[in-house]
C-alpha cells in the first residue's frame, strides 16, 4: 500500500467519473454553477459568470500545485458532461488524514446517486489506496442541506468549530465537522454499496 501518495487520478463508478479538473471542464460546469445557493456557504464569493467559473477552476489548480488539494470534475457517465466538482483537501500525509470538501452538483443532480457515488469513490481511494486512518468532512453550520447529505452517508458528527472562517462578505462562519475512521469504513462501505446497488 502506498501511503498518501497524492497524485492526480481518475475514479470511475457506475453513475459518475471523477477526473482531474481542468480548464476544459469550464464550459460544462458553467450552467450548473449558476445556482447562487451552491456558493453561498463557500469562501469564493459569487460564481455567476463563465469567467468566474474559469477563475474558480484556476484557483483549484493553484491549490493542487501547492500540494494541499486534489480537485476533480464530477462527470455524469450518461451524458459524458461535467455536472459538478469535489476535491481532497487539507491533506496531512504524516497523520494519514484528509478532508473531502468543496463538493457541489448542479441542481438537477442533487439527491441522486451522483453525490453518494462520488463520496464512495473518494472514500474508497482514501482508505484503500492511500491508507488513511481518518477522513473528515465539514460544512457551514447554516447549511442544513449539506449536513443532512453528510449524515446520510453515515459520517459521525464530531461537533462545531466556532467562528473558524471569515467569508468574503465578512460573515464569521462556524463549521460542523464530521469524520469517518478506518475501522468504521468497512461497514460504511457495505452500506453505501447497498444504497448504490438500489439506485
Image (cartoon, rainbow, N blue to C red):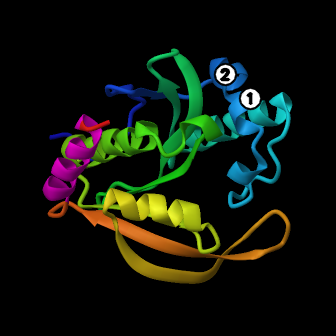
Q: CA distance from mark 2 to mark 1?
A: 7 Å
Residue in the image at 51% along x and 74% along y = 176
Residue indicated by mark 2: 28
Residue 136 in view here: no
**Rendered position, 172 above or below 20:** below
- Give, as a single range, the part of the protein colored magenta: 185-197
Residue in the image at 33% along x and 64% along y = 155
Horizontal and vertical percent for residue 24?
65, 17
**Rendered position, 63 above or below 172:** above
Instruction: Assess disc 1: are there few (<14), some (14-19) or many (≥20) residues with their C-alpha within 10 Å of its C-alpha.
Output: some
Element type at mark 1: helix
**Rendered position, 171 above or below 195:** below
Disc marking residue 31: 1
Tell me the quarter of the picture where residue 113 sits: top left
Left/right placement of residue 179 relative to residue 132 reads right
Horizontal and vertical percent for residue 123?
31, 47
Marks 2/1 in contact by CB < 8 Å: the verdict is yes
Horizontal and vertical percent for residue 135?
34, 59
Q: For this rendering, which residue is in front, 182 or 27?
A: 27
Which quarter shows the C terminus? top left
Tell me the quarter of the picture where residue 179 sits: bottom left
Amino acid at each position: 500500500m502506498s501511503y498518501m501518495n497524492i497524485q492526480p487520478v481518475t475514479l470511475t463508478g457506475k453513475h459518475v467519473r471523477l477526473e482531474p479538473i481542468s480548464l476544459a471542464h469550464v464550459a460544462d460546469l458553467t450552467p450548473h454553477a449558476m445556482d447562487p445557493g451552491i456558493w453561498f456557504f463557500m469562501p469564493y464569493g459569487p460564481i455567476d459568470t463563465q469567467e468566474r467559473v474559469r477563475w474558480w477552476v484556476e484557483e483549484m489548480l493553484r491549490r493542487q500545485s501547492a500540494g494541499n488539494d486534489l480537485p476533480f470534475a464530477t462527470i455524469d457517465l450518461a451524458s459524458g458532461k461535467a455536472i459538478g466538482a469535489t476535491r481532497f483537501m487539507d491533506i496531512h500525509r504524516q497523520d494519514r488524514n484528509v478532508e473531502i470538501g468543496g463538493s457541489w452538483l448542479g441542481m438537477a443532480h442533487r439527491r441522486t446517486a451522483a453525490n453518494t457515488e462520488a463520496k464512495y469513490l473518494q472514500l474508497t481511494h482514501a482508505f484503500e489506496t492511500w491508507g488513511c486512518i481518518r477522513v473528515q468532512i465539514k460544512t457551514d453550520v447554516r447549511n442544513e442541506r449539506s449536513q443532512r447529505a453528510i449524515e446520510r452517508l453515515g459520517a459521525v458528527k464530531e461537533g462545531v468549530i466556532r467562528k473558524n472562517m471569515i467569508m468574503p462578505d465578512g460573515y464569521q462562519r462556524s463549521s460542523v465537522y464530521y469524520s469517518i475512521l478506518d475501522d468504521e469504513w468497512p461497514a460504511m462501505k457495505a452500506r453505501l454499496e447497498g444504497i448504490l446497488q438500489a439506485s
